[in-house]
């Protein structure tokens, strides 16, 4: 099927895809498997039902109020997609620093009745007025990241509302207006500011990272701790109301997704992007033209599992499969999470994966991406052969996967933001969705009750590298910036097994891979896997020192691994797994404020 086809993948292809693979943990399991295709083939046969499905559904998300909104919709008979609409609407209110209706998202959906896996691409799009040099200054040098983030040039056409509308048309069971009601109530009545929100308002205020409208919304007059220019962050427990957001959601609930892209909301978005500093080129025509895409997932075998995620413009599906495909050549189960060898191989697989991902992955509507080559089993076996058991690789360069063109060295700077959630409904349908406004409060431009994204800073600021080679992730009109978002669903024997994802910028790939290795190789529960230390190796290794044995870190340094000083990275993982007796077991990252709650 073509890149833009309305498509799904049937889990019936699992047996063919995994033919020749041996049991988990076997060192030779990759060696006898056929090379991966870019997506699993999609024959139409009957799907297998969930094993003794006994659950009433589950929601795992980054804020308890968002979890409750999703559960309310599930209790009303809603589908996983209905609940996803409710969760996103509330997250945009109570966690505006991370995601919202002014941003974009990727959604992976499993249809339990048909066995199909479908992905929805709601990534932001560069306006038609965007130019390759728009993040360069008058001297041709890249803008500093803070300057670029606050500029109107950073704002892409928001995609999450259109994407949710498309998913709801296919998989919604309740009227479109119903899932928006919990967020509308909360916006009108107000909600207590959480510790994380208060802390991040303070962080933004201290760095002058709030433009006037957003500052007025999120701060109050005061001279207390963290005050700046007579304003202080809203304290924990303060009741925050947002009537403008309630009005926006009412318009969307009544008029459908297109009400966001036409009329008063669209006009507010365009005005917000056109404001100083460095006004952008976003127009009403750009908003009217936006359409989400419904795409084939990228799927591949990992030992006895089928792993499915997003294809470009997300690099997440490819990169997670690349890292797992590299690790498949090693007996990760025997190494275990408490060993130097286990973390050494995890680090080396990441380094190889990030090098290839950075060099080759971009919006494949406009740039040729060697998707099949990047996850090809033979190619990944050759990359794994570079890993030494007793020593870190001295240097890591991008490889040349089958079908890869010559590409320039990437110059993209990615900043953690984002949120992730998982929903499973009582019928066994699953949503794994990652959603973002990119940086802290996005572009900080606050319109109609929500923040606009700064997603276009996910492009490379430079169009070519020092050798004059074109950079894959350069800016172009109508192009989508590369993402690291990695919403993932895993199957075994044709049945749903795990759904997982995380925020965290380019570290998302490491977070999701870690959690999958923890569950699939190391036999951990979802919560145990989420709780594992975060270890990110895109360049110098960043490790969560509070969660890892210092002796392991010392041993890794002795093997030549270079570590960057810091306290580690802040993931926001959420995962749901089906137990052997058919129950749902969820996990929420303790590094944030989330919950994983099941219905009886």
Image: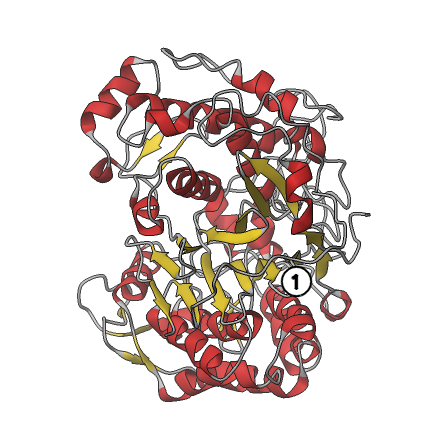
Q: Is residue 473 visible?
A: no
Horizontal side of 277 relative to 550 (left or right) equals right
Write down the residue under mark 1: 157
Specify the quadrant that holds the C terminus: bottom left
What color scheme is it? secondary structure
Residue 16 rendering spot, x and y as whole percentages:
69, 38
Horizontal and vertical percent for residue 570? 34, 47
> Residue 186: x, y in percent?
40, 83
Which class describes the residues within 10 Å of circle 1: few (<14), some (14-19), or many (20+)?
A: many
Question: Residue at left 68%, top 49%?
Answer: 12
Left or right: where does residue 482 sit relative to residue 479?
Answer: left
The image shows residue 270 at horizontal and vertical percentages of 65, 70
Q: Is residue 94 above or below residue 580?
A: below
Instruction: Give the SS element for disc 1.
Output: loop
| Closer-to-camera residue (112/594) | 112
Q: Locate residue 231: give its quadrant.
A: bottom left
Closer to us: 69 or 28 = 28
Asked whether, in this view, residue 532 is left or right of residue 130, the answer is left
Residue at figure coordinates x 53%, y 26% from the top left: 326
Residue drawn at x 48%, y 77% is 74
Q: Is residue 454 visible?
A: yes
């Amino acid at each position: 099927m073509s890149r833009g086809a309305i498509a799904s993948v049937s889990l019936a292809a699992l047996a063919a895809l995994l033919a020749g693979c041996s049991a988990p943990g076997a060192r030779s399991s990759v060696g006898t498997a056929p090379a991966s295709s870019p997506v699993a083939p999609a024959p139409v046969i009957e799907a297998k039902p969930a094993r003794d499905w006994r659950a009433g559904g589950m929601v795992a998300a980054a804020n308890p109020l968002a979890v409750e909104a999703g559960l309310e919709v599930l209790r009303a008979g809603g589908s996983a997609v209905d609940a996803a609409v409710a969760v996103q609407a509330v997250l945009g209110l109570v966690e505006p620093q991370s995601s919202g209706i002014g941003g974009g998202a990727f959604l992976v959906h499993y249809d339990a009745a048909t066995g199909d896996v479908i992905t929805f691409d709601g990534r932001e799009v560069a306006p038609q007025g965007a130019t390759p040099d728009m993040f360069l200054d008058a001297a041709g040098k890249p803008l500093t990241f803070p300057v670029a983030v606050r500029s109107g040039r950073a704002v892409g056409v928001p995609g999450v509302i259109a994407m949710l509308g498309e998913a709801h048309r296919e998989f919604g069971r309740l009227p479109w207006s119903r899932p928006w009601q919990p967020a509308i109530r909360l916006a009108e009545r107000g909600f207590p500011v959480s510790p994380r929100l208060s802390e991040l308002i303070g962080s933004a205020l201290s760095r002058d990272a709030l433009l006037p409208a957003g500052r007025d919304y999120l701060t109050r007059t005061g001279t207390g701790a963290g005050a700046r220019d007579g304003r202080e962050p809203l304290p924990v427990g303060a009741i925050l109301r947002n009537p403008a957001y309630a009005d926006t959601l009412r318009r969307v609930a009544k008029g459908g997704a297109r009400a966001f892209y036409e009329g008063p909301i669209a006009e507010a978005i365009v005005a917000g992007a056109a404001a100083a500093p460095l006004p952008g080129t976003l127009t009403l025509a750009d908003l009217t033209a936006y359409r989400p895409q419904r795409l084939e997932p990228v799927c591949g075998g990992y030992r006895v599992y089928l792993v499915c995620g997003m294809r470009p413009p997300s690099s997440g599906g490819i990169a997670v499969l690349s890292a797992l495909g590299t690790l498949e050549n090693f007996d990760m189960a025997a190494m275990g999470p408490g060993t130097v060898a286990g973390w050494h191989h995890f680090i080396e697989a990441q380094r190889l994966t990030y090098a290839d991902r950075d060099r080759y992955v971009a919006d494949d509507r406009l740039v040729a991406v060697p998707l099949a080559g990047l996850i090809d089993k033979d190619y990944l076996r050759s990359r794994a052969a570079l890993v030494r058991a007793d020593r870190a690789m001295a240097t890591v360069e991008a490889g040349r996967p089958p079908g890869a063109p010559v590409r320039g060295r990437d110059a993209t700077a990615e900043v953690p933001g984002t949120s992730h959630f998982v929903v499973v409904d009582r019928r066994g349908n699953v949503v794994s969705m990652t959603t973002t406004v990119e940086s802290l409060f996005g572009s900080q431009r606050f319109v109609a009750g929500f923040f606009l994204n700064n997603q276009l800073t996910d492009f490379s600021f430079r169009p070519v590298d020092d050798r004059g080679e074109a950079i894959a992730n350069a800016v172009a009109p109508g192009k989508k910036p590369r993402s690291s978002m990695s919403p993932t669903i895993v199957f075994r024997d044709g049945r749903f097994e795990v759904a997982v994802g995380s925020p965290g910028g380019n570290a998302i790939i490491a977070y999701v891979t870690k959690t999958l290795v923890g569950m699939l190789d190391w036999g951990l529960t979802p919560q145990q896997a989420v709780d594992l230390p975060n270890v990110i190796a895109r360049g110098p290794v960043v490790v969560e020192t509070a969660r890892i044995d210092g002796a392991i870190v010392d041993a890794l340094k002795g093997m030549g691994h270079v570590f960057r000083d810091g306290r580690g990275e802040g993931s926001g993982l959420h995962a749901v797994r089906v137990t052997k007796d058919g129950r749902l077991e969820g996990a929420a990252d303790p590094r944030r404020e989330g919950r994983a709650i099941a219905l009886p």
